[in-house]
Amino acid sequence: MIAIISDIHGNLEALKTVLGDIEERKIETIYCLGDIIGYGPDPAECLDLVAERAKMSLAGNHDHAVFYEPVNFNPPAERAAFWTRLRLDEEEDEHRRNQRWRFLGGLNPREAEGDFLFVHGSPRKPINEYLFPDDVYTAPQKLLANFDRMECLTCFCGHTHVPGVFVDDPYFETPDEMGDSQRYAIGDEKIIVNVGSVGQPRDRDPRAAYVILHEDEVEFIRVSYNIDVTANKIRENSQLDDFLGARLYEGK
């Protein structure tokens, strides 16, 4: 089994809770699909944990923005990116500071392993392109173009913070539509699996989200964590917009 996490966004409380759940399930292999940092109050600590625990980690658009430059970010996201950079630079331990920056700068935009492709955004634009559930109605050609770019049958992504499975009809199936098991069988069809967000869910469910890749199916997992801890840290940080904490309670 492999646990696949994404979009932690500096939410240490959510990350520690998810890692605890993964450990309880005796899953030893973890993949991270990016956006370890950005928005949240504990970027350094989240980088350390992911570097330690994840076998594979990818670059998300916020990771990329902090290392290079935030482009086309809204004002709260841009401010959070600049503050995150400052937070990492303020580390007094030179070895730890350099280690974090090397890890961040070494993140790849995509990885392929066997029959699976792993990206943050989409198969054709692995860092920045969003695949929204509504795209099945409003932008079906975008989805079909991404399926055409897939050389494998299954792609895992994050970025939108909304878990579920795209099929090339196109159609988007939510975990709730999969019944009580919250599992989707991997077959001979091409699918793109959004694993959801650990640190900032946006599907109206505030619980942290991740998936477990079994031998022939994907299982969607939700875990409750203490939102107050993260929200209070955001409110106490003058460089982070209060909205970034308030939205955690509503999962949006």
Image (spheres, grey):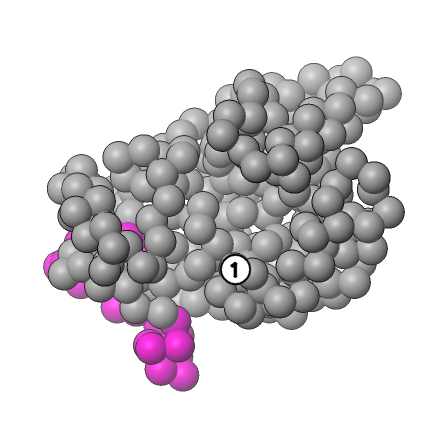
How many numbered marks, from 0 up? Answer: 1
In the rendered structure, does residue 174 fall within the stretch colored magenta? Answer: no
> What SS does tag 1 mark?
loop
Q: Which residue is mark 1?
A: 202
Q: 7 or 25, which lies in front?
A: 7
Determine the residue positioned at 26% across, 35% down: 124
Q: Is residue 98 left or right of residue 144?
A: right
Q: Position of residue 179 (x, y in %)?
A: 35, 82
Image quadrant of residue 232?
Answer: bottom right
- The answer to whether residue 177 is magenta is yes
Q: Position of residue 55 (x, y in %)?
A: 50, 40
Residue 25 placement: quadrant: bottom right
The three-letter code of the residue at mark 1 reads Arg
Residue 46 visible somewhere in the drawing: no
Q: Is residue 29 above or below residue 72?
A: below
Q: Which residues are magenta?
A: 175-193
